[in-house]
Image: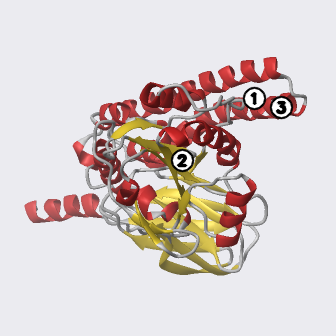
Amino acid sequence: MKTSLWLLFACVILVSCNGRKENQYIVSGTVKGSDTGTVYLQKMDSTSWVNIDSAAIKKGAFEFKGSVTVPEKYKLVIKGQHYSFPFFIENSDIRLVVHADSTGKIDVTGSVTQDLFNQYVAKSDSMEGKMKILDKEYSKADSLHDTASLKKLEANFDAMDADIKNMIINFAKSHGKSVISPYLILQNSYRFELPELVSVSASFDTSINASKYSIAVTKRIAILKSVQIGQPAIEFTLNDTTGKPVSLSSLKGKILLVDFWASWCGPCRAENPNVVKAYQAFHAKGFDVLGVSFDRDKVKWEKAIKDDNLTWNHVSDLKYWGNAAGKLYGINSIPSNILLDKDQKIIGRNLKGEELIKKLTELLGAPAKPAKIAKKAKPAVKK
């Protein structure tokens, strides 16, 4: 009798009513718009999405079985179709309804992690909607050269951005046992400085230490610690437009702005005139610039250098967000910059417009020629 009860107990613990084991996921789904075909289950490796499983669609239905150590973001891809369908997977019974016949929408039930992410999305969408309205108003004011409205809208942008950042931090701190918290912090890491990252990461429960999102946040904290003001610059070498290697240390001896940008980045191109003005005003007094491009297209990179009159050293490995120097310095949005003293110690970060002119004046005295700064640039482009 005792043996029978033990076996019954084990059965209840290890197997759900539909045969799912305790440490297993069963993802069953239906596809609206495709009765047959092949669906792939993908996860992100270090650089790209890779297939980890595939299943046949039979009469509009499919199923995957497997296990994960901690919940993680996966996605479905239907062979021959454009849309991909992301969702958070965990060891549970997960039901999907994939709307391949319309907007690329996916309905998910059975994933507590996905439910929590949906709560965040509801909050985020409301705030992002307000940002889009501001963006349209900004574009209209800009086209009319309405400087008074532009100034007011810039202040509204900053306030809304601060509200979004606070919402993300509060949401993450309130759900420290879910991988959604480090996931959101990682996705929005360009918003956060080191003290904020340290503070929010302290709220993560040890149960999610194995999550790749928690690990990535910890890694980013370590990178940012290494590039704080007062730290020595991290050496790197990249090729210039002619293919000649240029090392950071070869430019030692001047106040140096390491400027991370790209030809395809609108806010970067808008900020370039300010960097030009700073260069022209202080170059004769010992100021120099090293442009580090996140471009992929060499022709477009060279054209932007010429069109924007960027008459200083330029380097790139043409690896887009995979730029080696960008990774060393934790650059997740552009334009970004690092200001170095003559010994290549970091003395400033993300100084733009008037802030850069003010800092250079402190270091080098009055500019050799006046530097009239253009209007404030729109928000940076994130990774």
Few, some or many residues within 10 Å of mark 2 (<14, 14–19, 20+): many
Q: Earlier in the sequence, mark 2 or mark 1?
A: 1
Q: Earlier in the sequence, mark 3 or mark 2?
A: 3
Vertical relation: 137 (above or below) 314: above
Q: Nearer the viewer, residue 300 or 15?
A: 300
Q: Residue at x 71, y 59 (%)?
A: 306
Give the residue pinned by disc 3.
142
Locate residue 303: give its quadrant: bottom right
Q: Residue at x 57, y 45 (%)?
A: 335
Q: Is residue 80 left or right of residue 248?
A: right
Whole-number angstrom distance, CA of label 3 to CA of label 1 = 12 Å
User: Which quadrant, please, contains the N terminus?
Assistant: bottom left
Q: Nearer the viewer, residue 257 or 178?
A: 257
Give the residue pinned by disc 2.
333
Q: Residue at x 59, y 37 (%)?
A: 278
- Badge 3 marks a residue whose secondary structure is helix
Vertical relation: 290 (above or below) 379: below
Q: Given contact means CB atoms under 8 Å apart, are the residues at marks 3 and 2 in contact?
A: no
Few, some or many residues within 10 Å of mark 1 (<14, 14–19, 20+): some
- Badge 2 marks a residue whose secondary structure is strand
Few, some or many residues within 10 Å of mark 3 (<14, 14–19, 20+): few
Q: Is residue 234 left or right of residue 190?
A: left
Q: Nearer the viewer, mark 3 or mark 1?
A: 3
User: Residue 28, image x and y in percent?
Assistant: 53, 67
Q: Nearer the viewer, residue 71 or 321?
A: 321
Whole-number angstrom distance, CA of label 3 to CA of label 2 = 23 Å
Q: Is residue 195 visible?
A: yes
Q: Earlier in the sequence, mark 3 or mark 1?
A: 1
Q: Residue at x 30, y 53 (%)?
A: 215
Give the residue pinned by disc 1.
134
